[in-house]
Amino acid sequence: MKYPHDWMEEYVTKTAVVTAGTGGIGLETALGLSRAGFSVTVVGRDAARGARAVERINTTNPAHSARFLPADLGLLDQVRALADRIAAEHAASGQPLTVLVNNVGAMFPERRTLGGIEASFVVNHLAPYLLTELLLPTLTAGAPSRIVNVTSGAAGLGKRAFDAVEPPGGYYGFHWYGRAKLANLAYTLDLATQLKGTGVSVFAADPGGAATDMTNGTLSDPKIVSPALRLLWPLVRRTFERSTSGPASLAARPSIVAATDDALEGRTGIVIGPRAHPVTPLRAATDPRVAEDVRRLSERHAPLTTA
């Protein structure tokens, strides 16, 4: 028996996955998507925080209930398992994956590794890169769909050499965070070009700043910046902290706009700035050589298949 197409559309649920969606900007993004009619999956490490996030989302009277999926996105094996589960569930249900928001991010005051790879590069780039690449078939099957990668103004302070995960010189958390965000922004803009014509739109969203777990306390340590910047760091830090003192709900607006705004339908490769309007991308992120180096490095350290 065949049914009219518009009758069937009523039963196709818009779905969204938001990483690091149990608190801060991620939770506010999930709340915004839920209010826009999406069935939202929030991803995080802590089951208790996940349960509280789902309860809060569901109390906003959404059209569809939210859910929590556990995954530590600092561990690439768990990223792969998460992608496999999401892809399998969407294939089984027939519901499209409409939006993927890679909101996860972290800054580390001291150098650490995850799975033998420098942690900032793992969390801020390799994890969202790997999750996106593994879910591309699902997102393409559900087109029109959108990928939203959360970026940062700190990308402008990152070294632009990507022949290795770790740049030469000492470890300075703020700069290395910025470098990882630059890598992800270059990947985002390059992916948008590659996916033109597939129905999958790719955006970067710059939240500007908000008081979150990542910024609280981290910026007080002058060792997170290079010696050249250290003398000026108290002034720079105060400026940065003022920009990160706003509510997470305001910082989530660029991601929500990128994921839902009808004016962006059919468009791709756009950076949505802190005021929730398109802005000019960072020049270094538009360099094809940077994008090529980032992709090569990503494929080496986060292969899509494992032996």
Image (cartoon, grey):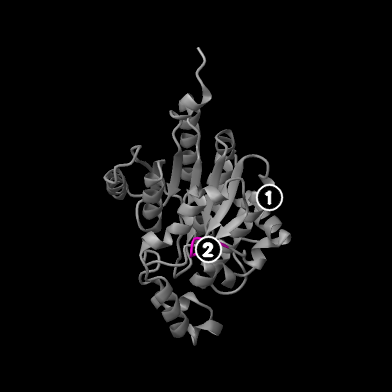
Question: What residue would you read off at disc 2?
Answer: 273
Q: 200 or 109: nearer the eye?
A: 200
Secondary structure beneath disc 1? helix
For marks 2 and 1, the one nearer the N-term is 1
**Disc number placed over residue 193 in the picture, else none:** 1
Residue 53 as seen in the image, left or right of residue 183: left
Q: Find out whether residue 277 is within the magenta segment.
A: yes
Question: Which residue does the image show at 48% across and 65% down from the upper left?
Answer: 275
| Residue 306 percent location from the top left of the image | 58, 40
Question: Which residue does the image show at 66% across and 67% down from the upper left?
Answer: 283
Magenta: main secondary structure: loop
Amino acid type, callout 2: Gly
Q: Compute the Cα span from label 2 to label 1.
A: 20 Å
**Disc number placed over residue 81 in the picture, else none:** none
Q: Find out whether residue 181 is within the magenta segment.
A: no
For the C terminus, give its image quadrant. Answer: top right
| Residue 231 percent location from the top left of the image | 49, 87
| Residue 106 percent location from the top left of the image | 45, 61
Residue furthest right in the image: 289
* Count of residue discs: 2
Secondary structure beneath disc 2? loop
Q: Quadrant of residue 235?
A: bottom left
Residue range (magenta): 274-278
Q: Residues within 10 Å of mark 2 (few under 14, many from 20)?
A: many
Q: Residues within 10 Å of mark 1 (few under 14, many from 20)?
A: some
Residue 168 as seen in the image, left or right of residue 20: right
Q: Is residue 97 above or below residue 221?
A: above
Can residue 176 be seen here? The reply is no
Comparing marks 2 and 1, which lies closer to the viewer? 2
Q: Quadrant of residue 163?
A: bottom right
Q: Is residue 293 above or below residue 140?
A: below
